[in-house]
Structure formats: C-alpha cells, structure tokens
Amino acid sequence: MTVSETSPAGTAAAVSETSPAATDAAVSETSPAATDAAVSETSPAGTRTHCPYCALQCGTLLGRTDGPGSGGGSVSVSPDPDFPVNQGGLCQKGWTAPAVLDVPDRLTTPLVRGADGRLAPAGWDEALGLVARRLREIRDEHGPEALAVFGGGGLTNEKAYTLGKFARLALGTSQIDYNGRFCMSSAAAAQNAAFGVDRGLPFPVTDLGRADVVLLAGANPAETMPPLLRHLDRASLIVIDPRRTRTAARAALHLQPTPGTDLALALGLLHLAVTDGHLDKTYLDERTEGFDETWARAVTWWPERVEAVTGVAVSELRSAVRMLAEAERAYVLTGRGAEQHSKGSDTVAAFINLSLALGLPGREGSGFGTLTGQGNGQGGRELGQKADQLPGYRSLTDPAARAHLARVWGVDPERLPGPGRSAYELLDALGTDDGPRALLVLGSNPVVSAPDAGRIARRLGALDLLVVADFVPSETARMADVVLPVTQWAEEEGTLTNLEGRVLRRRRLLDPPPGVRGDLDVLHGIAVRLGEPASRYPRRPREVFEELRAATAGGPADYSGVSYERLDRDEELYWPCPEGSSGTPRLFLDGFAHPGGRARFQAVEHRDAAELPSPDFPLYATTGRVLAQYQSGAQTRRVAELTEAAPEPYVEVHPDTAARASLADGQLARVSSARGAVLAKVRYEPSLRTDTVFVPFHFPGEGRANLVTHAALDPRSRMPEFKVCAVRIEAAR
Amino acid sequence: MSDADVDTAERIVVAGYGPAAHRLVERLAHRGHGGAVTVLGAEPEPAYQRPLLTSVVDGTLPSGALRLPAAPEGVRLLLGVTATAVDRERRLVHSDDGRSHPYDRLVLATGAAPRLPDLPWLHGSDGQLPAGVRVLRTLDDTAALAGAAPVTVVGGGPLAVEAVLALRRLGRDVTLVHRGPYPLDRHLDPRAGELLSARLRALDVDLCLGRTARAYADGKLRLDDGRCVAAHDVLLCTGAAPRDGLARSAGLAVDGGVFVDDELRTDDPRVHAIGDCARPAGPAGSYGGHTTAWEQAETLALLLTGDDFPPARSRPVLRLRARELDLVRLGAPDGADETVVLADAARGRYARLSLRDNRVCGAVLLGLDRAIAAVARLYQRGEPVPADRLALLLGAAPEYAGEELPGDVVVCHCSNVTGTDLEAAWQAGARTPAALTAATRASTGCGSCGDELRRWCTEFVRREEAVSA
C-alpha cells in the first residue's frame, strides 16, 4: 500500500514535462491522443459504445454533461434502445460505469519502485526505458523464457492481438497466458472437441427470446448479466445450481446438486433422455458420431445412482429431461458453475452430449451455448494471448498456422515459440528456478482473481521484475516494480467480440487524462526499446485491426471481412466473417466444423472433486459473483453506489450450519481451507444446502475468497477448481 | 499395505467379468498397472450393466445398450471361459477350455447366482427348471421373458418388485406371489409395506401375500391356499447366492460368500474377492449391491497399484429402481433417540426417519421424492439433519425466515432500488411507472420487476387517496 503518496494532482504536475508526444518523438510522430479522434461516431444522442464490463456488451450512449471535472463526472450514460442484446436495459454496474473514469486514485503517471521500496512517480521515458532495460538484462542472463506476459479477457481485440505478437516476437517467449483461462477454457475445450469451433453462443442472443425451455447449468445471469434475462422471459427455465440464486428462484425447475457433481448430473440426464425415449435418432445418424462409446459411459448413470451422488431427486431429473425434450425450441447453456472445476471440460462435454442426444445444436431455434463472462472473453480467447494459440483461433502447433502468422508478421516461422504454460502454471512458476523472472500484466488482477491467491501473491513477490499496466492501483499493481497508467473504455477506440461472436465497436468519448497512454502505445514503447521495428506494433487500433484481419483470414475465427467502416455502418457481423461475406449469425445450420460436418460425442466419465470435505474441513465452499461487483472488483469497488450495494466480503451459510459453529447473522467469520483463510461476514441463507457455504470473490486483502480455493487443474483445459473446495467455518477472533 | 508389498508388474488374473471386474480392470489401467491382466468371463457377452436388466425386460433399452465400455487396451479378455479350479500352491487358475493361467494376484469376481426356493415342483430329475420357469440374472434371461401372456413373479425383494413393475409397463398381467406379509418385508415396517402393497395393487398387480407356490402346470401356478393364478411364465426373484464354489474348492474360507478383510484379501494374501461373491467383515446379507461392488473394485485397484489410502466406503442404501414409485430404505432404526413419522396414505407418502445425535441412522421413505434424495445424502455423509424436519421431509424450498419492512425491500435488484427509494421518487413527482424508472433506474436491468413497479405505483395512489379521503 505504498501508492498513497501519488495523489493524481501531485503526480500530474511532477510528470508534466514528459508529455507522451515529446518523449517518444524518436519512435513515433503521432500522438495517440490525436490519432483516432476523428473516427468517434457521435450521434445527437451521444457516442455509441458498449458497457465496459461483461460479455453482454450492452449498447450504451455516452454524452457530456456539465457535471464536475473533465472525466466521469461530466459523462452521462444511457442504454442504447436500438442494440438488440440489452434492448434498452442496463444493470447498476453499467449505469455507474462513468464513475470509474475519474476515481480519485486513477493512475495518471507511471510509477517506479524506488530504493526505499515505495512506488514513486516517474516519467514515461524513464519507466519504459527501465522496463526495457530490465527485460533485456533478464533475457540476456536467463533466456527469453524468463520473460512472461499475463493478459486479460477485458482487453480489446486489438490489444489482445498485439499482446500475443509482442510476447512471441518482441520478448521471444512462449510464456504468455491470460485470465480467460480461469473463465472460458473448459467451455472452449469442450466446444472445440464437439463442434470443431468454439463460439460462446453460436447463435444471436435474441434467438433465446423465442425459446420454450432453456437449461442453465451453473449460470446465474440474474446477478452476472441481468439484461440477458430480457431474452429469457418467455422460456421456462431449468436452473442447475447448488445455490438458490436469483436466477434459480425464477426457474420453473431448480436442480440443486452437491457441489462438484454436475458431471454425474449431466450423465444422468443423458441416460434418462435415452431410457425415456427422447433420443433424436435421425439427428444422431445424420449429424453426429461417437454416440455408442458415450452411451457405454452413461449407461452406468441410471437416475437412482445419479440421485445418490448429486442429491437431486430422480423425479426432478426426469422432469428436466422431459421439459427439454418436449419443447419445440430448447437451449442448453453452461456457465462458470459447471466449468470452473478440475473436470470442467468433461462436464461441458456431458451437457453438449445431452443437447446432441436431443438434437438441439445446429438447428434454428434450438442449440447449445456457453455464457461467456468477461467483456471480451470471446475475442480474448481467439486472438493470440492464450498459451497455445495464434490469432483467428489457430493452433500454435499447427505448421500451416505458424507459417501463415509468420508471413503476416514478416518473420521466419522458426522464430515463433511453441505453446507455453497455462495461466495458473505460469503464475505458479514465477520466480522459481526454471520459471519466469519478469512478468508484464495487462488487464488482470491475479492477486485477487487467481486460485490459491496467497500462494500466487508470494510467487509474484518472488519476481525480479513485475510490470503492471492498469488504470487504477489494483492489488496486483500495488505489488509491481513499475506501474504504467493506461486508458479505459470511454477513452479509447477498438473492437470487442461479445458472447454471441458479434464484433462490436468501442468508441471514444473523452481524451484520456494527461499522462495516461493506451495499452497499444505502451507495448509499442517497450517493443521499440527492445529493438523491434516501430512499424511492427501500430499504436492506432484501426491499424492493428487491419493487420488482425489478415492474421485471422482463413482461421476458424475469421475476422477478415470485418472492418471499422462496416461496423460503423451498423452491420451486424458475427465471425466467421471472411472477406466479402456478411458474417455468420448462426453456426452449424448446414454442418459442424469438423471434417465431414458431424458433431462429436465425447465419452466422458464422472469423477469426484479434487478435494472433498473431511473431518478438519467438513463443508463445501463455492465461490461466485454478485451483481454490484465485477471480477476482482478493481473497478467496481471504486464506485460509491456499487460499494453501497455490495460493501464487503460475506459468506452465505445455512442457519443450521451457522448455529452449529455458534455464528450469528452478521458476525465476522473465518472460512479456512487447507491453503488459507478468508474473513467474511456471516449472512444467513436458509435456501442454501447445509453442507455448503458461498463466498463472493470480488474483495481484496483478507476478504479474498481465493485464499481458500484449490488450484487443482482440469487436465484438458487447465481450468482451476474455483467452484469447490473443502472448508470449515468459525468465528473470527 | 505399504509400497514394498506391491510390485506393479504383477500378473493379475480376474475370475469373472461383471460390472465389478470391469471397473477393476479399468481402474488398474487408469492407475498405470504395468503387469499382465487376464480376465476370464463365463458369459459369451463382454461386461454389461447387470442392474439395468429390468430396463431390457420392459423394452426401454435393447440388450446391446447395456454393454460397458471396451476393456482397456492390453487386457487379455477370455470370454465364454469359466475358471474351474485354483492351484494356490503353483498360483495357477485352470479354466474350462483346458488352459491354465499363472497369477501373482488372483481376484475372484464370480458374482452371484439366483437362489431357488426349496420347492419340490421346481426341481425335476434332470436338475433343470421346469419349462416356463425363469430367473433374471443375465441378458439371456431377458430374452426368454419376451411375450404378452400373463406372468407370475415369485419373491418379495427389490428385484421382484422392479421386475413386476417392468412387466406391468409392458402391459402384461402380473401376479406377485410372496410368502411374506408384504413386498420388501425385510426392509420396510408394516405401515410402509401396506402403502407399497396398495401402490402395487393400484398398478393392477395381483398380490398374493403370505402364500407359497405348490405346483405349476398348464400355465397355472397353484398356491398353498388352493388358488390358481395365470402364469404363462413364472419368474423366480427369490434372491441370489454368492458364487463361492471356486473359492471353496480352493480351500479358502467361505460361508455365504468368500470372506475378505478390509483390504479385500481372502485368507490367502494373493487372492482377493470383490462384488457379489465376496463377504466383507460385518453382518452377512448386506444389500449394497452394485455400489458396494464398484467401491470394492476401486479400492482394490488402488491397493494393487500401491495406494495406502483407499477412499471411505459408502453405507448401503436400498433405492428402488422404478419410475412408478420412489422408495428408499437405509440404515436401521436401532438406537434412535428421535423418530419422525409422516404418513399420508391418501397420496401414498410415508416417512419414518430414525435419528441419533441429530443424524440419520435409519429411514424408510416412500413417495417423497425430494426427501429421498436429501435424506440419503445426509445419511451417506453422516451430516446433521436440518432443524426443520418437516421441511426436509416435504422437500419444500425453504423461504427466507427474516421479515423485512416493506420499505427496505429491494424492488429492483439490478439497480438496487428499495421501496423507500421509490416512495422518495414518487414524492419528488415521479407519478407513473415510467417516471419512477427514469428517476430511480428501477426495472432497467433484467426488466423483471416491471409488474412490481406498477403495484407500488398503485399503492402510492391508494395511500394518497386514503389520506385525502
């Protein structure tokens, strides 16, 4: 907590002599502030852009008011009534998003940790020069694999793309991954295996509005993306969640399984689909393969056995299958509740198997999908910041993909490193003998959001160099050796790809505060100082996007037909969108993306959670989200209205369970696992299972839910097991 | 067992290839067992899911659908081959095809055979069952049960009840002959038994209770009260006896199953037994069935591959597999310090919950679907039961206990707007739902509180009218 000395007013003055335009004159003559002002589309109603938070990317209209200050205080926001995803809706986070633009501790100058161990203001040239020098030194001594990059699912497409290119070319390292690994990786692995491609929703979100039945497996959109519910008004909902969430409370049928047993549940639903005569045999024959091997697993999951494992009554399992099978239009959607497990990929696969057995995917009006979480969780997972990927959802191990990218980037394919460590493995290796010694973090706050967060904070502390680019002093930024202040949503141009695979324009309303630079500019500045050609790292988003089009051309996620011009003409462009095409709102109608066009069943088997309750830790803990906070809370905890709604860490406990631990409602409790403990206020919740407690993960310090979570990884996706671990609860002394 | 005892290159021979043996060889492969594995399966079929035979009987599944996944690569699978003798001295298993199979570890997984009642008319001079009399133990047996003619089931255990229901699903006329006072009389108290009998009668099952069959001829089964019941087929569901003959002839300790210790060892440390043929320490005649068998297979796979910490075993639960009626029996009422009874004869619902130290020690639940799921979990985990016993038994979704003042009620969760906020906006001049929305952002998120907003609007109008009147 050493940044308190850097008040925005003071720092701005201190660095005023180093304006970006002046310092980088040698490497670029265009000041980023000037470049894209012309492209902002400003209608009479205001600047049309999208909310900075979740993957719904609600359309918003920004305007200037005569409110205080030049930042958020002078910005008005209203929902865009014409954008089909939110249909004029916006949740409290979206309404208050302008407040993040001028939070009191907004970072407006680079900070460098001095000899006294404190972060102090520095000029950009000094900060970038220091970063480049240290990166070079560490690389010279330990090789390029000692340099690592950690990205985020909130970064624009242009940033995500550039970050991957920067790591592989400017740093020459394989060590890059991003926080989307903690978010979408299980769904991605399962969808790729089943369908040959992974687009969160392979159909426009508005299709859900005509559904008769929607099954939500481990999704709680009433808290996490409220405007989505506008599309779920008509459908009868089946909600699978160990908690009676706000979404579950609206459901026609709520299945409340023991944490960590969703896979058994899904196998049981498939079993019932077969034994109750709901198998779509024609669809199976014509459009799928691999059913027999899958059934040979599901045959052992008859409903009474599933009931014993999950605690969900046979009658309810049967109702769920009947509702889905009898609906004319039905969807199966998964969320993090099903995916954030050490068997998350297999669990998603099991729900895909169910939807295939019922003949849903690739049929207009029905389907399977996953609700992507972060703002650019879709674009972020397919444009090259993932350890095993190249832009366009290409594989880093595919020689043809490597050759294509090498051509676009003007380098020898040999120069591209191979796949690196996955997010948790990368973080866990930091500062170890054969792990990275320098880390650059963009758009992420792993001190709060990584599993086993106490351990990860110690690993970050063992680095020789930690560089964090952010617009607020996040918990991770506070640990950094160098902090680089960057722009945020309403101050920048770019594109994001929302949960339906639709590419959207982010448009600028405001100039960033003095002293703040765009992430592209930061990467450019470091790369050039590392000796890379300046032209390889454009600073204007539009230029990056032009390159990104070429880079993704021919890949599964093909953006080559998308352009800022088309987007600014309000064209609805869903990838794949090859040059000249009008995009693909609905995938799979004519066939799946595997050779031969068939979807593939995956023969998966249930297994226990990596950690089960024991005498020392007799309860299940599960983690999740609340409406008024977003992810690690770095942004939303700085908004007074949101902090008022969700002020502090809490733990939901069944009153019986609380009584046995002698805990009163409202009392401060310690929730401990084998790894650590989180302090949180007890909240009685009679609808909770007596064997389970729930802790939201948005809070910092001793209130970090991830101090107790377990980093057991999914063997396919490398997703950590955020959703279940064993804990005990007691009064905090 | 310590690591030193385990040589992962051991040759393992498994006698039998039912679900327990299948699970064992899968788990051995999963755990990386390096030695040769040979399986002798007496049936010509590869392993199949025996507990689902009634689903084949009622036509829900074709017989091929019961097949379990293929054995892991490298397993030497000999089908239609029965182990006939064990030479423990030379560590050889002899089989009926004349071959012999050397082992370092032998696993007996020979299962169980139908137990036939001691009725003279059943046992002809040729040792075969009379024509039309059948058992239900193998896939072959299900084929013989095809047809539409009346059938009589003899027996009163879970398989008898499940078979009766499966045959009724086919539309066949079914009679159940059982010598006990009601079906499942070994598991249920009389009140539950009455309700079960009533339910079966309501499903048009002809129940002949307290009766035994005296003779069978010309499609008629004559009972000891002189009554004759139609029985084109007679299906004997009168229990199963562990197939322990191989162990017995090898000189291993046997009595209604092959005795095994906690590590599933027989009295020869190189010979193990799992599944229906094994008799673990504890009371005989447990009713764990397939769950116990699988757990034994998993435990043995761990032990044979050098794991010291086999998982805890689950407690036996009898859960009827029939869509027409939900029934569970678990534990025993002995030693209970609290008993909760709920009987709703009109709707066939019944619960007898036996608690000790606030935990379930025994229960019989009938027709209470959600309670069955919840109570079985509590029993398995040894967890305290919720204070509200009735809510547990009714499976009711608990409501919030606390009472909130209306003004503190959050009307719009998406924008965190309370009734008090709405009232303030009303007082400030927002007099329509749309105006309230504009003033407070209520109903701008998920949109689900629109109706509530209108109700509040009406309520404000009513209050003002009340004041002015």
Image (spheres, rainbow, N blue to C red):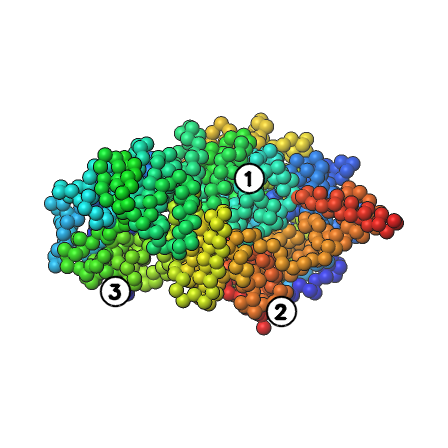
Residue type for callout 1: Val
| Image disc number at residue B4 | 3
Q: Classify residue B199 as left or right of residue A447.
A: left
In the picture, the quarter occupied by the C terminus of chain A is: bottom right
In front: B283, or A375?
B283
Q: Nearer the viewer, mark 3 or mark 2?
A: 3
Query: Callout 1: residue from which chain?
Result: A
The residue at 57%/62% (across/down) is A655
- Residue at mark 1: A214
Q: Position of residue B189 (x, y in %)?
A: 39, 56
Query: Callout 2: residue from which chain?
Result: A
For marks 2 and 1, give the CA distance: 57 Å
Element class at badge 1 = strand
Q: Position of residue B195 (x, y in %)?
A: 43, 49
Residue type for callout 2: Asp
For the question of whether residue A339 can be seen, the reply is no
Q: Nearer the viewer, mark 1 or mark 3?
A: 1
For marks 3 and 2, give the CA distance: 56 Å
- Residue at mark 2: A116
Mark 1 neighbour class, 10 Å CA radius: few under 14, some 14 to 19, many 20 or more: many
Q: Quadrant of residue A78?
A: top right
Q: Are marks 3 and 2 in contact (CB under 8 Å)?
A: no
In front: A247, or B462?
B462
Query: Callout 3: residue from which chain?
Result: B
In front: A428, or A724?
A724
Disc nearer the start of the sequence (2/1): 2
Element class at badge 3 = helix
Mark 3 neighbour class, 10 Å CA radius: few under 14, some 14 to 19, many 20 or more: few
Same chain for the residues at labels 1 and 3, yes or no?
Answer: no
